[in-house]
Amino acid sequence: MGWQLEKFRNYPQSVKLAIIFLVAGWGVHFLFIHAYFSEIFPLSMIYKQAGVGGLICLFVAMIKRWARMLCIFFNIAMIGIYLIFLQLFFSSESHYYQDGSYLLFGAVCMASFIAATYFLVTRECNQFFKAYGREQKDET
């Protein structure tokens, strides 16, 4: 584990921030879905989402170029889902959705995915993933 942390410390700032925001986004998403929708959705579906999110975070942290692109597409979908959720939150007259923690969880989650996506599409991050992939091919 120590060598992985040392590798992470040597990543460019944009890559570090992308990974941090990505983990935060999936973590908050899991907490949000589990806290508010576990009565509606089966727990197996919630855990599958957590598994998918965890694997995406793992492969992005391992600097897999394909995972970066997959992550960007997943993030765009998650941002869209949370935009729809926030629109429903503000347009709903139901008191069920008027709890402020719904808004807070949704906004934090969406902001985390937006920040992760922003940092993943930066030039510095793109170049690092390309160079890291070439280094791995050269070593084998």
Image (spheres, rainbow, N blue to C red):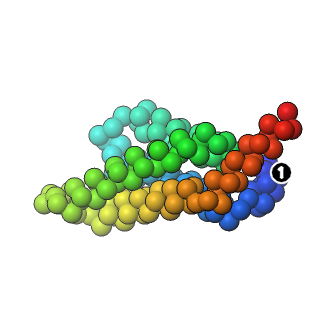
Whether residue 29 sits left or right of residue 121 in the image: it is left
Residue 115, image x and y in percent?
A: 50, 62
Q: Residue at x 31, y 41 (%)?
A: 39
Q: Nearer the viewer, residue 103 or 57?
A: 57
Picture quadrant where residue 137 is located: top right
Against 52, residue 8 (above or below) is below
Q: Secondary structure at mark 1?
A: helix
Q: Position of residue 61 (x, y in %)?
A: 67, 49
Residue 46 appears in the picture as rendered: yes
Screen quadrant of the C terminus: top right
Toward the right, the furthest residue is: 139
User: With 122 as the anchor, is 95 left or right in this view?
Assistant: left
Name the image quarter holding residue 58: top right
Q: Nearer the viewer, residue 4 or 127?
A: 127
Q: Residue at x 47, y 35 (%)?
A: 48
Q: Residue at x 33, y 38 (%)?
A: 41
Can you give x and y, in whole percent of width and height, for residue 56 in the image? 57, 42
The residue at the point 27 percent across, 64 percent down is 99
- Count of numbered labels shown in the rendering: 1
Task: Reply above or below: 69 against 102.
Answer: above
x and y percentages locating residue 107 in the rendered image: 38, 63
Q: Which residue is mark 1?
A: 3
Q: In this view of the protein, which residue sits in the foreground, 127 or 136?
A: 127
Tell me if I can see residue 20 in this picture.
Answer: no
Q: Residues within 10 Å of mark 1 (few under 14, many from 20)?
A: few
What amino acid is labelled 1 in the image? Trp
